[in-house]
């Protein structure tokens, strides 16, 4: 039941290319929303950060360790008709991270470093290298297992969110990309990706969800 049908059709029936397949059913994910839910002050959380500087969206998410509730606490998407020199406001990101550390007991902050190397390094100095962890999303083995965990948590209703529409939208935009990583059953695994590299439909908040849940 868990087999990637599109991949099998390409391999066994010699399809010229693999059709894209949505990674997560957006309706199923949306149904896990608890509108307005919050994580209590002082709770143990994992933070996750993924983003770009100018083009893709940038997100900061908190995941409650006791309950699995995910809350997007920082979201920066390039505005429509933005000026060519528009950039994600770094100080706003730093402020959001600082507030998170003040509000909760942060177990780990997982951050994808590209485009944010200096900032992530400063977080590690400020909050501790044992807490701020570089988490490269192009590490296919780590990402594939995290995507499987995220998908299973949704199927098993072990994860919830606060109904953030942008988070739901990004999850709905995510497609499967098979990678050269095999699971314990010797079946090929997958990571999430955009519909194609030129797509304007972003998935960065979904990546935050995957990182925070793993």
Image (spheres, rainbow, N blue to C red):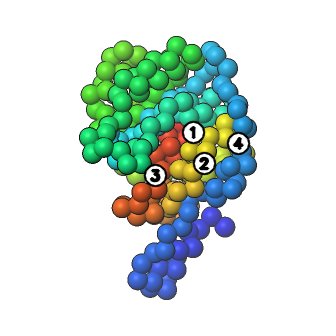
Instruction: Report which residue position mark 4 lands on.
Output: 33
Rendered location of residue 129, percent (x, y) = 37, 21
Which tag, 1 or 4, sits closer to the chain's start?
4
Which tag, 4 or 3, sits closer to the chain's start?
4
Marks 2/1 in contact by CB < 8 Å: the verdict is no
89 versus 168 height, above or below? above
Marks 2/3 in contact by CB < 8 Å: the verdict is no
Distance of label 1 from label 4 (alpha carbons): 15 Å
86 versus 194 height, above or below? above
The one of 213 and 184 positioned closer to us in this rendering: 213
**So how many labels did they put on this image?**
4
Q: Secondary structure at mark 2?
A: helix
- Is residue 16 visible in the rendered structure shown here? yes
Query: Which residue occupies 35% across, 44% down?
Result: 82
Q: Which mark is residue 168?
A: 2
Please rate how many residues cluster around mark 1, counting C-alpha atoms within 10 Å: few if below 14, some from 14 to 19, many from 20: many
Report whether 205 appears left or right of 27: left
Which tag, 3 or 1, sits closer to the chain's start?
3
Report whether 12 appears left or right of 140: right
Query: Which residue occupies 49% across, 82% down?
Result: 12
Query: Which residue occupies 61% across, 45% down?
Result: 165
Instruction: Report which residue position mark 1 lands on.
Output: 213
């Amino acid at each position: 039941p868990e087999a990637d049908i599109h991949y099998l059709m390409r391999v066994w029936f010699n399809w010229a290319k693999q059709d894209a397949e949505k990674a997560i059913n957006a309706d199923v994910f949306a149904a896990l929303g608890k509108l307005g839910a919050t994580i209590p002050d002082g709770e143990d959380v994992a933070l996750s950060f993924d983003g770009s500087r100018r083009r893709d969206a940038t997100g900061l998410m908190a995941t409650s360790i006791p309950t699995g509730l995910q809350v997007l606490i920082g979201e920066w998407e390039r505005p429509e008709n933005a000026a060519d020199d528009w950039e994600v406001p770094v100080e706003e990101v730093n402020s959001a991270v600082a507030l998170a550390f003040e509000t909760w007991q942060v177990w780990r902050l997982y951050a994808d470093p590209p485009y944010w190397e200096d900032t992530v390094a400063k977080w590690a100095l400020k909050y501790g290298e044992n807490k701020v962890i570089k988490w490269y999303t192009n590490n296919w083995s780590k990402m594939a297992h995290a995507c499987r965990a995220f998908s299973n948590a949704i199927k098993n209703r072990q994860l919830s969110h606060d109904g953030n529409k942008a988070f739901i939208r990004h999850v709905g935009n995510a497609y499967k990309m098979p990678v050269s990583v095999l699971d314990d059953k010797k079946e090929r695994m997958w990571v999430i990706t955009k519909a194609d590299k030129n797509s304007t439909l972003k998935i960065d908040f979904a990546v935050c969800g995957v990182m925070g849940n793993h």
